[in-house]
Image: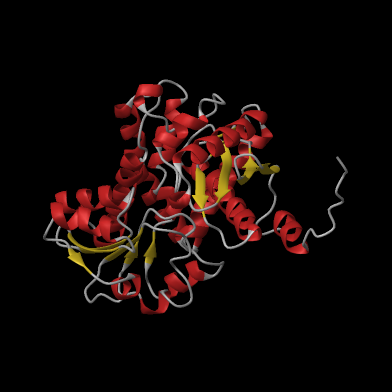
Amino acid sequence: MGVTTVTDVTDGVLHTLFHSDQGGHEQVVLCQDRASGLKAVIAIHSTALGPALGGTRFYPYATEEAAVADALNLSRGMSYKNAMAGLDHGGGKAVIIGDPELIEPPQRTALLLAYGRFVASLGGRYVTACDVGTYVADMDVVARENRWTTGRSPENGGAGDSSVLTAYGVFQGMRASAQHEWGDPTLRGRKVGVAGVGKVGHYLVEHLLEDGAEVVITDVREESVRRITDKFPQVTVVRDTDALIRTEGLDIYAPCALGGALNDETVPVLTARIVCGAANNQLAHPGVEKDLADRHILYAPDYVVNAGGVIQVADELHGFDFDRCKAKAAKIFDTTLEIFARAKTDGIPPAAAADRIAEQRMAEARRR
């Protein structure tokens, strides 16, 4: 077999890997298994605090460059998330390129086994889990090839669905935001808009209703909306996110789908006083946090409030205890208030305050 010379590597991918805003990663692994069709990216941003920990996203990216960029952004976010959650883990993330809805079970199994072998090749530098497009059953398959897999089913020694504690942590962040903004840590009587009521969002809706909030939802999947309205007919449904963020009298906006929800188009028309949701990378670009502050909209940093899930999967490595994890996730309330206090003291937006605290913790770990 002849050796093929690679001559068409674009400047875009390499620039993304080493660009100062997105780069600084310790290791990026491009994975390909032709037999199964696997194409994946594993990005390790930092192991300063311990082995990199972060989920596996399965998504039909438009380009390979988009997949690399997402892996870099998400893994960097995991470093900050794990630092703020007080975990002994750095940040990592993996993305699998493809549409998980279009891949039949036999091929999906082969693809996930191949992916598991790539994770195993890193020797524990990266610990994986679920993310958008992957589920507990998928992690059970991945775990057949390596022991650095969390988010597995209880039957296979795991903790099960991490969405439960992710939603609980977001709820605690929302309570802290209400405390900071209105002096009372309750959502009773507040109108909360949830964009995306899938794996995490539907659990969040339940917490909000139990606390007495008025809930407005939207989701691109009709079945996700129907699951909510069949159980909770009092919930209001609007056609799309654009309608949701413009809802009159909205107190809190909770982005719980994909990232980039807060951008140059959405921030100027937001009616909510608070943004607090489960989605990763909600700020579309640097500067959006200042735009929110200029409009006196309180932003609860996404990687802080959505850390309940990673708290759960990290605990799985040491023998899972749900009550212990829930107690740790409840501390997201205090962490969120700490960030708001730091933001006020330093005269900066909460997102910048959270970054400073996380960076300080990582820097201190590197000096040890």
Q: Nearer the viewer, residue 96 or 80?
A: 96
Residue 133 image position (x, y, % from top left): 44, 48
**Left or right of residue 31, residue 142 in this image:** left
**Picture quadrant where residue 138 is located:** top left
| Residue at 21% from the left image edge and 74% from the top image edge | 249
Q: Nearer the viewer, residue 8 or 266?
A: 8
**Picture quadrant where residue 313 is located:** top left
User: Looking at the image, what colour scheme do you see?
Assistant: secondary structure
Residue 357 seen = yes
**Left or right of residue 301, residue 221 in this image:** left
Is the C terminus in the top left, top right, bottom left or bottom right quadrant?
A: top right
Q: Nearer the viewer, residue 180 or 127?
A: 127
| Residue at 87% from the left image edge and 51% from the top image edge | 5
**Left or right of residue 174, residue 295 in this image:** right
**Left or right of residue 9, residue 337 in this image:** left
Residue 49 seen = no
Q: Is residue 301 above or below residue 53?
A: below
Residue 82 image position (x, y, % from top left): 50, 40
Q: Is residue 120 above or below residue 225?
A: above
Is the N terminus in the top left, top right, bottom left or bottom right quadrant?
A: top right
